[in-house]
Image (cartoon, rainbow, N blue to C red):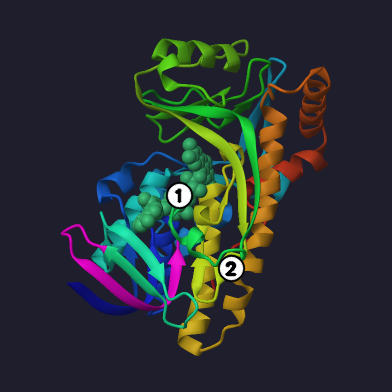
C-alpha cells in the first residue's frame, strides 16, 4: 500500500543544501519534507568541508544558526602560500577591506541544521530507499520513496528540490537533451586525514612542492586536517600512517617550524573534478549544490556554493509559492550559474597553480612558480585571490 500526502516543497537529500533550504523555507512559512537515504548519524559524521566564506557566516548568523559556530568556529584573516621552501602570508582583511573566513566543519553545520529542523517539528525521513521524482512536466511533481519501516510514500508537491549531491537521482531525472555538462577531471587526487593533534599553524598552509601539493588545515583547536596530492588511481592501502606523516613533513617543512603528529582517526582519497550541469531547473524541479556542480576542494567553495544556491532558491520559491510570481524562479539557474562559474574558475586556478601535473614539464612548473611569485608580490594579484577566497559574490537574503 502507498501512503499519499502533499507538501509545498519536496526536498531530496539532507546534506547542507537540502537541510538549509528546508530551514529557510520554514522561516517564510513554507512547508517541506526532506528525504535522505542515509542515517542521521551518518549525515552528521561524514567528513567533508570545513571552511565558510564571510557571506556564509553572516547568513547563518542572520537566520539564527550562528550560536555554536560563533562559540566554536575559528576565524581566520588569511592563509599561507608556500613554495620553493618559503612560506608567505596573505592578509585577507587588509586586502579585502575586512573580509575573513571561518573554520567550522560541515559536520557541525549539518548537526546544527538537523537539530533546529527536528526541534521545529520538521519532516526529515532518514534511511529512505528507492527515491523517485516524477510528473516533472506538470505543476504538481511527485516525490516517491520507501521509508525506513518499509512503507511506500507518494508526496504531491508544488516544487521538488534536488539537493541529492553528485551521485543523486534528480539530475538524471531531467528530460534527455536538456542538460549540458561541462567537466574537467584532474590527473591527481587528495589523500585527506583527520588527526587528533592541535594544528601546527594558526591559518591554513597551501604548499606547492616539486613532489606534490600539501595542505594543512584544521577542524578545531584539538583536531588537525591535512591533505596530500596523490596519483589519481592511488589506493589508500599504500599509505600507512607513518608514510603519510613522513610525506607531510617532507612537503610542508620550512626552517624553524615543526609539524606536530598525532593519531590519525580517518583517512580517505577523493578524486578531483570540476563539473557544471546547466540549466539547474526544469519547470518545478530545481537542482542545488553538488547535484548541479562540483569543484575541486582547493578553493574551499563546494559547501559555500551549496549554501548560496539554496539561499537564492528559498527566495525564488517564496516569491513563487507565496506571491504567485515566477520571476525569480525563472531566473534561478542563471542567477546561480554566474556565481558557480566564478567559483569554478577560482577553484581550477588554485588547483592548477598548486598541484604538480604528472603530464607537465619544466615549462609548466615555471609558469606555476611565476604565478605564485606574482601573487605574493603584487597587491592586485593577492587581492584577486583574497576576494575570491572570502567570497566574491555577496549573499542576498531579504528580511521578509
Ligand atoms: C574531501 C572534501 C573536502 C571538501 N572541502 C570543502 C571546503 O573546505 N569548503 C567547501 O565549501 N566545500 C568543500 N567540499 C565540498 C562540500 O563538502 C560539498 O560541496 C557539500 O557537501 C555539498 O552539499 P550538498 O548538500 O549539495 O550535497 P551533499 O553534502 O552531497 O548532500 C547530498 C545528500 O543527498 C543524499 N542523497 C543522495 N542520493 C539520494 C537519494 N536518491 N535519495 C535521498 N537522498 C539522497 C546524500 O546521502 C547526501 O546526504 C569538500 C568535499 C570533499 C569531498
Task: Pinpoint residue 285: horizontal percent, then vertical percent.
Answer: 49, 71
Residue nearest the viewer, comparing 165 with 380: 165
Q: What element carries label 2?
A: loop
Q: Which residue is drawn at 31% across and 75% down?
A: 155
The secondary structure making up most of the magenta span is: strand
Quarter of the picture holding the N terminus? bottom left
| Residue depicted at 59% across the width and 11% down the height | 256
Is there any visible trace of residue 399 in the rendered image?
A: no
The residue indicated by pointer 2 is 396
Residue 133, given in percent of the width and then of the height, sits at 40, 68
Q: Which of marks 2 and 1 is in front?
A: 1
* Residue 16 screen position, x and y as percent: 42, 55
> How many numbered discs, if any?
2
Asked whether 157 falls inside the magenta stretch, the response is: yes
Q: In which quarter of the image is residue 11?
A: bottom left
For label 1, count other residues whose C-alpha is less than 10 Å away and answer few (under 14), some (14-19) or many (20+).
Answer: few
Res 145 quadrant in image = bottom left
Magenta segment, which residues? Answer: 146-162
Q: Is residue 357 above or below residue 65?
A: above
C-alpha separation, residue under disc 2 versus residue under disc 1: 28 Å
Q: Mark 1 points at which residue?
A: 167
Residue 43 at x, y = what percent? 33, 48
Q: Is 223 drawn above or below residue 122 in the view shown?
A: above
Looking at the image, which is closer to me, 156 or 88? Answer: 156
Amino acid at each position: 500500500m502507498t501512503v499519499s500526502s502533499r507538501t509545498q516543497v519536496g526536498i531530496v537529500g539532507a546534506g547542507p543544501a537540502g537541510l538549509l533550504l528546508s530551514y529557510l523555507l520554514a522561516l517564510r512559512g513554507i512547508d517541506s519534507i526532506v528525504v535522505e537515504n542515509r542515517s542521521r548519524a551518518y549525515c552528521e559524521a561524514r567528513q567533508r568541508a570545513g571552511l565558510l566564506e564571510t557571506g556564509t557566516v553572516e547568513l547563518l548568523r542572520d537566520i539564527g544558526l550562528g550560536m555554536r559556530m560563533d562559540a566554536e568556529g575559528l576565524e581566520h584573516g588569511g592563509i599561507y602560500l608556500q613554495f620553493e621552501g618559503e612560506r608567505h602570508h596573505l592578509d585577507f582583511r587588509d586586502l579585502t577591506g575586512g573580509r575573513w573566513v571561518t573554520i567550522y566543519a560541515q559536520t557541525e553545520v549539518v548537526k546544527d541544521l538537523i537539530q533546529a529542523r527536528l526541534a521545529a517539528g520538521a519532516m526529515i525521513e532518514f534511511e529512505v530507499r528507492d527515491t523517485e521524482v516524477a510528473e516533472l512536466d506538470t505543476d504538481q511533481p511527485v516525490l516517491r520513496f520507501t521509508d525506513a519501516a518499509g512503507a511506500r510514500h507518494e508526496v504531491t508537491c508544488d516544487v521538488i528540490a534536488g539537493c541529492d549531491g553528485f551521485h543523486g537521482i534528480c539530475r538524471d531525472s531531467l528530460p534527455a537533451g536538456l542538460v549540458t555538462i561541462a567537466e574537467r577531471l584532474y590527473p591527481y587526487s587528495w589523500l585527506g586525514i583527520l588527526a587528533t593533534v592541535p594544528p601546527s599553524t594558526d591559518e591554513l598552509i597551501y604548499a606547492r612542492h616539486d613532489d606534490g601539493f600539501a595542505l594543512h588545515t584544521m577542524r578545531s583547536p584539538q583536531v588537525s586536517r591535512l591533505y596530500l596530492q596523490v596519483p589519481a588511481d592511488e589506493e589508500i592501502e599504500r599509505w600507512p600512517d607513518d608514510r603519510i606523516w613522513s610525506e607531510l613533513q617532507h612537503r610542508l617543512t620550512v626552517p624553524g617550524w615543526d609539524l606536530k603528529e598525532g593519531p590519525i582517526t580517518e583517512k580517505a582519497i577523493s578524486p578531483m573534478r570540476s563539473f557544471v550541469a546547466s540549466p539547474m531547473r526544469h519547470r518545478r524541479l530545481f537542482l542545488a549544490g553538488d547535484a548541479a556542480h562540483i569543484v575541486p576542494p582547493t578553493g574551499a567553495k563546494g559547501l559555500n556554493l551549496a549554501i548560496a544556491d539554496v539561499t537564492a532558491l528559498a527566495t525564488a520559491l517564496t516569491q513563487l509559492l507565496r506571491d504567485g510570481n515566477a520571476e525569480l524562479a525563472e531566473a534561478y539557474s542563471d542567477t546561480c550559474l554566474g556565481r558557480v562559474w566564478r567559483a569554478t574558475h577560482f577553484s581550477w586556478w588554485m588547483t592548477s597553480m598548486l598541484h604538480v601535473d604528472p603530464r607537465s614539464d619544466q615549462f609548466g612548473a615555471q609558469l606555476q612558480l611565476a604565478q605564485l611569485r606574482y601573487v605574493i608580490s603584487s597587491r592586485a594579484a593577492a587581492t584577486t585571490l583574497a576576494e575570491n577566497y572570502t567570497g566574491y559574490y555577496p549573499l542576498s537574503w531579504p528580511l521578509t
